[in-house]
Amino acid sequence: MHEFDLHHIFSIGLILVMIAAGITAIAKKFKQPYPIALVIVGAIIGLINVPVLEPLKDFATEGEIFNFAIITLFLPALLGEAALKLPFSHLRENKTPIIALAFAGTLLSFIIIGFSSMWLLQLTLPAAFVFAAVMSATDPVSVLSIFKSVGVHKRLATIIEGESLFNDGLAVVLFNISAFYLLSYTELGLLGFGYGLWEFIKVVSLGLMIGGALGYAVSRLTKYFDDYPLEIIFSIILFYGAFLLAESVEASGVIAVVVSALILGNYGSKIGMSPTTKLNINNFWDVITLLANSIVFLMVGLEITRIDMTDKWGFIALAILLVLVARSAAVYTSLAFIKDVPASWKHTLNWGGLKGSLSIALVLSLPRDFAGREEVLIFAFSIVLFSLVLQGLSIKPLISWLGVNKKEKGYHEYEELIAQAHALKIAIFEVKKLEDNFMTTEIVTQEVLSQYKQQLDTLQTKIEELYNKYPELKQKQMNTLKKHSLYAQHEAIEHLLTEGIISPEVAEQEIGKITNKLVEMEGSH
């Protein structure tokens, strides 16, 4: 690898982006979860020998590069974007299941995997609990991107997001304690347990305080500016600044980012952001997270192929089973006494507890001389591959089978009527075209058209009755129509500005009005 050749590194990075973007585009075109496609293609590229791609594979799979890219470069952006768009009201309404899963569930899974790994997988005490830490949390990079593409009930999506954002922070704290302090703590007995508990409280509380303070400060700062490019820069500084500052004082950078983004997205957006700024900040982070997710999952696929799993298949199968059992115990136990979480949601949360890039990055960050590092690497990589490919591909059919993503009442009937009406309109168009080309006589044409129009009128009556029965269907159609018309108005104003027909001041004023209406529509959903 050309370690100090920045031009070479940039070229390789650009190739990585191009491949990731191409795979993502194809997956989206065929309406498939793009993270899974990227992991599979990345693994294929890693396994086959393509000389022109060898520098890319060497660069992307180098341990320090991978660790830096996932944890320092991409994780703050991905966590920040998710937390930025998560309303406090949604968190408050679902705080009980989120807290139960993120805290009780994570700790229970950590304990089960830790002790079972010592006994069944023959790992040392630190290695067993390091493995337990990286396998106890759902990876936000994986979970959020896949579940957003699948489409689930809004409240379930909030629980999934809340759990993945918060238990991720706890997993990183447990990982650091297990990797660097566990042996010394266990030697001290009860006193060591006290030290461990204090370390846990210190790391979490410092992360909360740093994230809270920076989030509040930047939120107040936005009040003095109405300039969305500048406020986007503020958000970038906030997410990365919170992460790096917290990590520099041995606090949880993950928790700091999540808290700071939650405050900016809720408090800051109310006191200091115009609707135009909110829309542009959200659009900016949408682009960044799509790019980051695409590169992350391609790198995961490449990285997985570097691990030699030969002669470990029995232990690997046992490790996968162990993690699945621990996840089930964590979900069903922590939610056992919460009545408003349906059984179908629990099944979805259980099977949807995917592992991903963060688990790999954490294990790769272990010192080279860490006892049991290779075994933990093999188990972690195997479980991530199983999780992303097998669980990831089966989660959508599972959700459909459980009825978790059922559409609103009347929607199936509505779709049937729309399909029939569209088919009739195409038929009417074709009949008229045949008449225009003198291929049929007017008498025959009018008779056929009369039949089709009669059928179309009947369908229109049925659609109107359906709108009266289910007003939300009509509202959804109206929202779609209004949104498209607003985009057309936006384009029309920009065209007038480009042609010099209106001044930039008038264009900005009119575009601002249109943007405000778009933001209001987004907020009302």
Image (tube, rainbow, N blue to C red):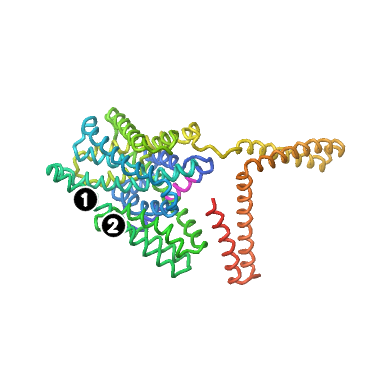
Secondary structure beneath label 1: helix
Q: Nearer the viewer, residue 237 or 216?
A: 216
Category of crowding for the residue at label 1, using alpha-carbon neighbours closer than 10 angstroms: few (below 14), some (14–19), many (at least 20): some
Q: Is residue 355 left or right of residue 416?
A: left
- Give the label, 1 or 2, closer to the camera: 1
Figure quadrant of residue 364: top left
Residue identifier under label 2: 246
Residue 311 rendering spot, x and y as whole percentages = 27, 29
The residue positioned 63% from the left and 60% from the top of the image is: 489
Three-letter code, disc 1: Glu
Residue drawn where x is 32% and y is 39% of the image: 105
| Observer able to see residue 48 | no
Closer-to-camera residue (450/17)? 450
In the depicted structure, whether residue 283 falls above or below residue 408: below
The magenta-colored residue range is 16-24
> Residue extending furthest left?
188
Task: Estimate the x, y position of residue 389 in percent, counting from the top left.
Answer: 41, 36
Mark 2 crowdedness (10 Å alpha carbons): few <14, some 14-19, many ≥20: many
- Residue 191: within the magenta? no
Q: Secondary structure at mark 2?
A: helix
Could you tell me if the residues under marks 1 and 2 are in contact, i.e. CB atoms within 8 Å?
A: no
Separation of marks 1 and 2 at Cα, in angstroms: 14 Å
Q: Amino acid at mark 2?
A: Ala
Q: Main secondary structure of the magenta part?
A: helix
How far across and down, in percent of the image, does residue 517 sit? 58, 59
Q: Is residue 17 magenta?
A: yes
Tell me where residue 248 appears, x and y as whole percent.
Answer: 26, 58
Image position of 253 with respect to 441: above or below: below
Can the viewer see residue 425 in this picture?
Answer: yes
Question: Residue at position x 60%, y 38% from top?
Answer: 411
**Residue that badge 1 annotates:** 199
**First along the sequence among labels 1 and 2:** 1
